[in-house]
């Protein structure tokens, strides 16, 4: 098998229809298989897939395992030379799979691959990013990352000045649509399941680089990402989960001291944004979007200021701000 496409599903009936149709309603030269790892959907997703796409292999996990663990279920079942991790809210453009396979075959030195991803309105999604750093977080906190257009020294996150139309090495590619060499992916044992939501693909791409394999981007294959249909705007639980995994990432790759510095940069970033949007609300008046954003900042700042990040990593202990974690705390020090 040339390509295994692994898609996780958690009550994604509304979007996975379009995803599968975009794959199967076009001709491909590439031999491929589709594996759906279902996280206990109750919206008829599994029934729809089996009735309309019987060639898809559906694995029922019967519980929400999260992004990393559910994808690993699919990866273990995959037989492809390459494994494509694909979100259910993505649309595969014409010949994208064939173009991606042709590019990957030309670059046996690479372990992972990025491609062009678009927003629903056709604008560039910027799926390829620079690895997060403490310096970058401090620049973001004080808005200094905006100076990156004048000097790459201030770069943080994005590849400033790059429009995604050229091939290049990248640090990491968004987990909504990222391709790996199957043998390497299995050697690395897939995603680190201690990351339940967010930073899973950052961690995996870093381990690909650490193993001695670059990640290469090509603009030829194109996908559209419809952007997290199951996540509401400014969800506090997801904002907290991102920060939990941010601390886990820095602990794992840079040690205990890094999480303390990361917390300080994070609080500064949040305080600056809270002040900015509070002023905006004062000038423009209350509205649902601003109120939701400010409430999110209030809770997340409270959580961070009361958090001992080292103790959090070592024991899982964290402040109670009325929003339970999406999953039990893993043992990062084990």
Image (cartoon, helix red, strand yellow):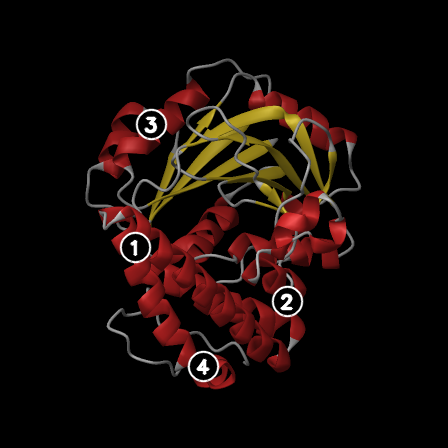
Residue 194 visible, this angle = no
Check disc 2: other Cα within 10 Å, few if <14, some if 14-19, many if 20+.
some
Residues at circles 1 and 2 in contact by the CB criterion of under 8 Å: no
Alpha carbons under labels 3 and 2: distance apart: 47 Å
Q: Position of residue 293 (x, y in %)?
A: 32, 55
Q: Earlier in the sequence, mark 3 or mark 2?
A: 3
- Measured Cα–Cα span from mark 3 to mark 4: 45 Å
Q: CA distance from mark 4 to mark 2?
A: 19 Å
Rounded to the nearest whole Å, what is the CA distance between mark 4 and mark 1?
Answer: 36 Å
Q: Position of residue 148 (x, y in %)?
A: 69, 48
Q: Earlier in the sequence, mark 1 or mark 2?
A: 2
Q: Are marks 3 and 1 in contact (CB under 8 Å)?
A: no
Residues under numbered marks 3 and 4 in contact, where contact means CB atoms less than 8 Å apart? no
Q: Where, by quadrant of the figure, is residue 221 drawn?
A: top right
Q: Which residue is mark 3?
A: 54
Q: Quadrant of residue 117?
A: top right
Q: Residues within 10 Å of mark 1 (few under 14, many from 20)?
A: few
Which of label 3 and label 4 is nearer to you? 4
Q: Nearer the viewer, residue 32 or 139?
A: 139
Front-most of 294 and 176? 294
Question: Where does the image place residue 151, in percent across and percent down from the top left?
Answer: 76, 48
At a point 34% along the width and 32% down the height, the residue shown is 16
Residue tagged 4: 312
Nearer the viewer's eye, disc 3 or disc 1?
A: 1
- Left or right of residue 168, residue 30 in this image: left
> Sequence-wise, which precedes: disc 4 or disc 2?
2
Of pointers 3 and 1, the one earlier in the residue sequence: 3
Quick check: 42 left or right of 132? left
Could you tell me which residue is drawn at 29 percent across and 24 percent down? Answer: 52
- According to the image, label 2 marks what residue? 134
> What residue does disc 1 label?
282
């Amino acid at each position: 098998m040339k390509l295994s496409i692994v898609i996780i599903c958690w009550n994604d009936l509304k979007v996975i229809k379009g995803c599968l149709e975009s794959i199967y309603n076009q001709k491909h030269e590439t031999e491929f298989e589709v594996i759906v790892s279902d996280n206990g959907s109750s919206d008829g997703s599994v029934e729809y897939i089996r009735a309309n796409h019987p060639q898809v292999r559906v694995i029922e996990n019967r519980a929400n395992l999260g992004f990393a663990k559910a994808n690993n279920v699919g990866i273990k079942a995959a037989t492809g030379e390459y494994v494509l991790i694909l979100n259910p809210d993505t649309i595969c453009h014409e010949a994208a799979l064939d173009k991606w396979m042709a590019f990957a075959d030309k670059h046996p030195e690479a372990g992972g691959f990025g491609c062009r991803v678009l927003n629903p309105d056709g604008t560039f999604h910027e799926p390829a990013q620079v690895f997060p750093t403490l310096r970058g977080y401090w620049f973001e906190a004080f808005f200094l990352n905006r100076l990156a257009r004048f000097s790459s020294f201030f770069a943080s996150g994005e590849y400033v000045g790059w429009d995604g139309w050229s091939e290049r090495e990248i640090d990491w590619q968004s987990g909504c649509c990222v391709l790996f060499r199957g043998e390497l992916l299995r050697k690395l044992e897939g995603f680190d399941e201690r990351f339940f939501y967010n930073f899973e693909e950052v961690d995996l791409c870093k381990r690909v680089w650490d193993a001695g394999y670059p990640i290469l981007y090509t603009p030829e294959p194109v996908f559209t990402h419809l952007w997290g249909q199951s996540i509401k705007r400014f969800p506090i639980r997801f904002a907290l989960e991102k920060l939990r995994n941010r601390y886990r990432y820095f602990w794992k790759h840079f040690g205990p001291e890094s999480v303390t510095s990361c917390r300080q940069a994070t609080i500064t970033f949040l305080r600056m944004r809270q002040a900015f949007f509070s002023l905006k609300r004062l000038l423009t008046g209350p509205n649902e979007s601003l109120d939701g954003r400010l409430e999110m900042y209030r809770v997340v700042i409270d959580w961070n200021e009361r958090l001992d990040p080292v103790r959090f990593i070592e024991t899982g202990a964290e402040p109670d701000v009325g929003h339970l974690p999406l999953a039990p705390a893993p043992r990062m020090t084990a």
